[in-house]
Structure formats: C-alpha cells, structure tokens
C-alpha cells in the first residue's frame, strides 16, 4: 500500500484502532474539498495497532473533539512537507456542543437552541456532567 506524504495539511496519529471513522464524522471531514486518507489498523510498536488520518489541506482541527474521542491522539501540522508543530491532547475541561444531554428534563432538550455544555467531573473515569442538570455522561474507551 502506498499513501503519499502531504505537503501542507494535518496528520492525526496514534488514533486508537477503529476510532478513525468516528473522528471523520465528528470533524466533518466529508465536507472538505481535499484528499483525506484514513489508514486503519497500522502496526505500531507502541500501541499494537493504530489508525492514522492524513488531511491534505491546512485546517484548524477541533482539539476538544479529538481530546474527547481519544486524548492519546497526536496532531501533526505539516507545512512545505515538514512537520512544524506536534500537539499532544488531553481530555478537555469543557465541551460545548460536542455531546448532548440525554436527560429528558434537561433545559437543553426543551430548548435545543441552547449550547450543550458538559464539564469534566472525573478524569480517571472520563466522565462529564451537564452544566444545566448535572446528568453524567461517561466516555467509553
């Protein structure tokens, strides 16, 4: 298999195997007018298997979404064929309009135009709480 290198763009590396399509959806990569390569189940000495996404266009990536999906992802920014930045992620403290409250009594269900805000409540459990009703949402690994 031959995947070309990119001259200007973003490479998302160290994605947990099988999570690349979820990232593709959350980042709306289908709406881009450039090449996007999803490489699944790549052998990795560190992780066993991993996924990689290459985006052949400079763009701002929502680091909160990526950190929520998989905080171990690294974001590499490529300019003129050279990596100019490497960003390591963490679970975000606050998520706005990334996840939505399932509590039927939450104000965000009755008023869908309100921003859905979740705050990190337990780092070890990767759980968040709705800022309005305190309902818990735990991120499955």
Image: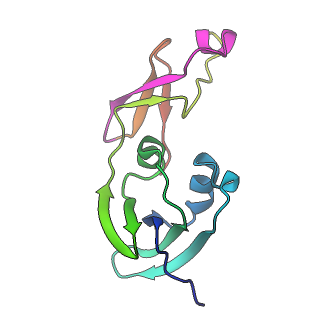
Q: Residue at x 40, y 76 (%)?
A: 81
Q: Which residues are magenta?
A: 107-124
Q: What percent of the width, then of the height, locates residue 74?
A: 36, 61
Q: What percent of the width, then of the height, locates residue 114?
A: 59, 14
Give the quadrant of residue 64: top left
* Depicted 75 relative to depicted 38: above or below: above
Q: Residue at x 69, y 55 (%)?
A: 30
Give the quadrant of residue 24: bottom right
Q: Residue at x 57, y 74 (%)?
A: 39
Q: What percent of the width, then of the height, locates residue 133?
A: 50, 12
In the drawing, does residue 127 fall left or right of residue 115?
Answer: left
Q: Is residue 106 visible?
A: no
In the drawing, does residue 33 fall left or right of residue 5?
Answer: right
In the drawing, does residue 76 fall left or right of residue 16?
Answer: left
* Depicted 43 relative to depicted 55: above or below: below
Q: Is residue 108 visible?
A: yes
**Residue 54 painted magenta:** no
Viewer-proximal residue, 96 or 35? 35
Q: Residue at x 56, y 54 (%)?
A: 23
Q: Residue furthest front?
A: 80
């Amino acid at each position: 298999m031959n995947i070309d290198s990119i001259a200007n763009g973003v490479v998302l590396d160290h994605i947990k195997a099988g999570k690349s399509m979820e990232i593709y959806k959350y980042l709306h990569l289908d709406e881009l007018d450039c090449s996007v390569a999803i490489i699944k189940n790549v052998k990795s000495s560190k992780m066993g298997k991993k996924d990689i996404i290459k985006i052949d266009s400079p763009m701002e990536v929502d680091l909160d979404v990526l950190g929520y999906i998989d905080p171990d992802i690294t974001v590499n920014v490529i300019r003129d064929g050279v990596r100019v930045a490497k960003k390591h992620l963490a679970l975000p403290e606050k998520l706005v309009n990334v996840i939505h409250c399932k509590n039927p009594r939450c104000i965000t269900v009755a008023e869908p135009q309100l921003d859905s805000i979740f705050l990190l409540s337990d780092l070890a459990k990767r759980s968040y709480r709705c800022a309005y009703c305190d309902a818990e949402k735990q991120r499955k690994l």
